[in-house]
Structures are given as structure tokens and as C-alpha cells.
Image (cartoon, helix red, strand yellow):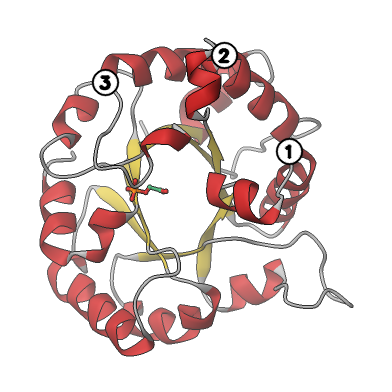
């Protein structure tokens, strides 16, 4: 049985001093947390410093993005090997904010997932529908299509892990999560999609389904009660240490 995973996605928030202070608070309050995996994803520029702060703790480090080439003329990008050198164990891939603002496509997501797996990083692959797609009754189709394209040609070997995050785009940062029963339905679609791709033992042991979108201490228990939910991607509430500590305390 996989441990639950709780991922703090700090996005492009806080100044350098505030990020350091927040990482130190996480270390002091959660550094010895056991029985669950806690991952902090600061922006690229803060990875080096926060990697130092987290040394010797149980907290893990993740990048908010990754690039698929090893090196070369790719202005502004960073290579998987450098992320690995900085002690990253995870990378978020295909976050809706990157899809929306930076034109990240399913094809790019697919390359990024491959780069993660080749470099022993666990990809945190984000999928989810927009408000318009939901209104048109397209949620299942969108999630299915995004996953199928993202995972095309990808095999998971025994030692590799993958995290698949259902993040309904329209609730991210809104303060209002979806109904847990709706998330459970989408998790079923996601699980079936990966069962169609990989052996059941790999799906059960190496793939985790998590929820993201306005998670807070008040609503998290509705999701922990779900059969298929194995963790959370937390944005806004991960910038407030008290809220994040409360959330992690509610997760087994
Ligand atoms: P939120 O962000 O918790 O602020 O809604 C979640 C995410 O985008 O990962």
C-alpha cells in the first residue's frame, strides 16, 4: 500500500526571504512527519536554497516544471539532471496554469513525463476540465483524452512511481473545492484509463491518484474518506504554515 502524498505547490508566490522562512517553518513543524510523504515545490530559483534547508528531514523536494532535453540551446529551461542534482525527487507536469498561460500541450506533457522517468524523478501529472468543459458535460472526456495523450508510449517499471492529479481548473484558487463524490467519479475514470494501459499490480503499487483545487483544513476530510484518493496537491493553503500543518494532520 502506497503512503499518502501531500504536495505543496508554492507557485510564483512570496519573495526569497519569505520562501526561506516558510521552508524553515515546514522543517520545524513537519520535518519528522512519518507515515506520509510531504513534498515542497518551490520555483526553480529557490530549489537550491530550500534543498539545503530540507537536508536531513523527511520532507521531499519537487520542481514545478521540467524540460525534456538533457542540455543545449533551450533558453530559460532547466534540465532533468540539474533538478536531480538539487535533490528533487518529483516534478509537476502539465499544471493547468502552464497549459493556459504558457501553451503547454499534451505532447509536451508526454515528453516531460518521459524525461522524469528516465531521470528517476516521479512526475506529478495534472489533468482536469475547465468550467466551460464541465458545463458541456465533457469532464470525463477531457480527463480521459489528457491522460491518454500524456501517457502515450509510457511504461512504468517496477521501481518507478507516478502521481496523477485531478485538478478541476475552475476550482483552483477559488476557495471552493468540488464535491468529493464528483472527484471520486473522475478518479474511477482515471484508474480505468491506467488499468487499460498497465498491469494492475503496477497501477495498484506505483500509481497514486490525488486531488488538487482549493483544499483546506475544512474540506480535506471529505476527500480522505474517498476510496481512490491517495493525496493532495495544495496551492494557496500551502503558503500558510498553520493551514498546511492542519491539512497534513488530517491525512493518514
Ligand atoms: P489551490 O491550488 O490549492 O490554490 O487551489 C492547487 C493547485 O493549483 O495545485
Q: From the viewer's perspective, tell me whether residue 216 is left or right of residue 213.
A: left
In the rendered structure, which disc, 1 or 3, sits on the residue that comes first in sequence?
Answer: 1
Q: Nearer the viewer, residue 13 or 220?
A: 13
Which dot marks residue 179? 3
- Structural crowding at the residue carrying mark 1, measured as other residues with C-alpha within 10 Å and reported as few (<14), some (14–19) or many (≥20): many
In the rendered structure, which disc, 2 or 3, sits on the residue that comes first in sequence?
Answer: 2
Q: Alpha carbon of mark 1 to alpha carbon of mark 2: how far? A: 17 Å
Asked if labels 2 and 1 touch by Cβ distance under 8 angstroms, the answer is no
- Structural crowding at the residue carrying mark 3, measured as other residues with C-alpha within 10 Å and reported as few (<14), some (14–19) or many (≥20): few
The x, y position of residue 122, in whole percent, is: 56, 51
The x, y position of residue 249, in whole percent, is: 11, 48
Q: Which residue is mark 1?
A: 106
Relative to 49, say whether 223 is above or below. Answer: above
Q: Which image quarter is the N terminus in?
A: top left
Picture mark count: 3
Q: Alpha carbon of mark 1 to alpha carbon of mark 3: how far? A: 26 Å
Identify the residue shown where x is 56% and y is 17%: 200
* Secondary structure of residue under mark 3: loop
Q: Which image quarter is the C terminus in?
A: top left
Relative to 156, say whether 192 is above or below. Answer: above
Identify the residue shown where x is 18% and y is 49%: 248
Q: From the viewer's perspective, tell me whether residue 209 is left or right of residue 34.
A: right
Relative to 36, say whether 25 is above or below. Answer: below
Relative to 153, say whether 194 is above or below. Answer: above
Which dot marks residue 138? 2
* Secondary structure of residue under mark 1: helix
Identify the residue shown where x is 35% and y is 39%: 213
Q: Is residue 223 visible?
A: yes
Tag in front: 2 or 3:
2
Q: From the viewer's perspective, tell me whether residue 138 is left or right of residue 4.
A: right
The x, y position of residue 229, in whole percent, is: 33, 27
Amino acid at each position: 500500500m502506497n503512503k499518502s502524498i501531500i504536495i505543496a505547490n508554492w507557485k510564483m508566490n512570496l519573495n526569497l526571504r519569505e520562501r526561506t522562512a516558510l521552508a524553515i517553518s515546514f522543517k520545524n513543524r513537519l520535518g519528522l512527519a512519518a507515515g506520509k510523504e510531504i513534498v515542497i515545490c518551490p520555483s526553480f530559483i529557490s530549489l537550491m536554497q530550500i534543498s539545503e534547508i530540507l537536508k536531513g528531514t523527511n520532507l521531499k523536494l519537487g520542481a514545478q516544471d521540467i524540460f525534456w532535453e538533457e542540455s543545449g540551446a533551450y533558453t530559460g529551461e532547466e534540465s532533468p539532471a540539474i533538478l536531480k542534482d538539487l535533490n528533487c525527487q518529483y516534478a509537476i507536469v502539465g499544471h493547468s496554469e502552464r497549459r493556459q498561460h504558457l501553451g503547454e500541450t499534451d505532447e509536451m506533457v508526454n515528453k516531460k513525463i518521459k524525461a522524469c522517468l528516465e531521470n528517476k524523478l516521479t512526475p506529478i501529472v495534472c489533468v482536469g476540465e475547465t468550467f466551460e468543459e464541465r458545463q458541456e458535460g465533457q469532464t470525463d472526456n477531457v480527463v480521459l483524452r489528457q491522460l491518454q495523450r500524456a501517457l502515450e508510449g509510457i511504461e512504468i517499471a517496477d521501481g518507478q512511481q507516478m502521481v496523477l492529479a485531478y485538478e478541476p481548473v475552475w476550482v483552483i484558487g477559488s476557495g471552493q473545492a468540488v464535491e468529493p463524490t464528483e472527484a471520486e467519479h473522475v478518479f474511477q475514470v482515471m484508474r480505468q484509463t491506467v488499468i487499460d494501459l498497465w498491469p494492475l499490480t503496477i497501477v495498484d503499487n506505483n500509481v497514486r491518484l490525488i486531488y488538487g483545487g482549493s483544499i483546506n483544513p475544512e474540506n480535506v476530510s471529505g476527500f480522505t474518506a474517498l476510496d481512490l484518493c491517495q493525496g493532495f496537491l495544495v496551492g494557496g493553503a500551502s503558503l500558510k504554515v498553520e493551514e498546511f500543518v492542519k491539512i497534513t494532520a488530517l491525512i493518514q
